[in-house]
Amino acid sequence: MAGTLRRHVRVPLESLVQLSWPDEGGVVNSVTAKCLDISNSGMRVEIKVPIQNRSYVSFRLKGIDFDGTATVRSCVRKNLRYELGLEFLGGLRWEPRVEAAAIRDEAV
């Protein structure tokens, strides 16, 4: 039933994503995570360490010209990893047609 509350359809997207965020002490952390899926307003990523809800993260999808800032909406432990729900900020929107073309060009 929760799926019916979503504003945008999630599209599977397997890509590496670089994340960086400041911790509570102001030290900037940076990790490579795995993008699981994406929608017009956010994405779900798999990461080895938790990031606190409402934290701001900068991201860059590798192999795709798409980067920006997001906020952590959820962080759920899944076995030895965490799944983060990220919501894009600043009016940033992912356009599936544009990114799908970029992925196809990258594969050729």
Image: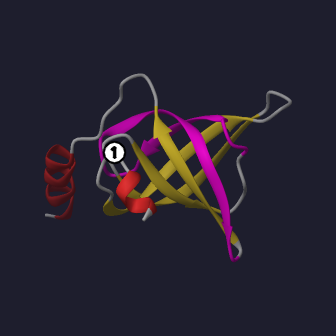
Q: How is the image coloured?
A: secondary structure
- Residue 14: percent from left, percent from top: 37, 65
Q: Residue at x 48, y 56 (%)?
A: 44
As for residue 2 lying within the magenta part, the answer is: no
- What percent of the width, then of the height, locates residue 92? 35, 29
Judge whether 6 appears above or below 22 on screen: below
Residue 75 appears left or right of 60:
right
Q: Which quarter of the picture shows residue 68? A: top left
Residue type at mark 1: give it.
Arg
Residue reaching furthest to the bottom: 79
Give x and y (percent) for residue 76. Answer: 66, 61
One can see residue 36 in this view = no
Q: Main secondary structure of the magenta part?
A: strand
Q: Position of residue 41 (x, y in %)?
A: 37, 40
Identify the residue shown where x is 53% and y is 51%. Answer: 85
In this view, the residue farthest toward the right is 25
Q: Quadrant of the C terminus?
A: bottom left
Q: Indicate left or right for 78 with 15 as reference.
A: right
The residue shown at (51%, 45%) is: 86
Magenta span of residues: 52-79
| Residue at 78% across, 36% down | 23
Q: Quadrant of residue 71?
A: top right
The quadrant in which the N terminus is found is: bottom left
Q: Is residue 74 left or right of residue 63?
A: right
- What is the residue that sits farthest to the top in this orientation? 90
Q: Is residue 95 above or below residue 15?
A: above
- Numbered disc total: 1
Decide if residue 29 is in sight here: yes
Disc 1 crowd rating (10 Å Cα; few below 14, some 14-19, many 20+) is few
Circle 1 — which element?
loop
Q: Which residue is mark 1?
A: 7
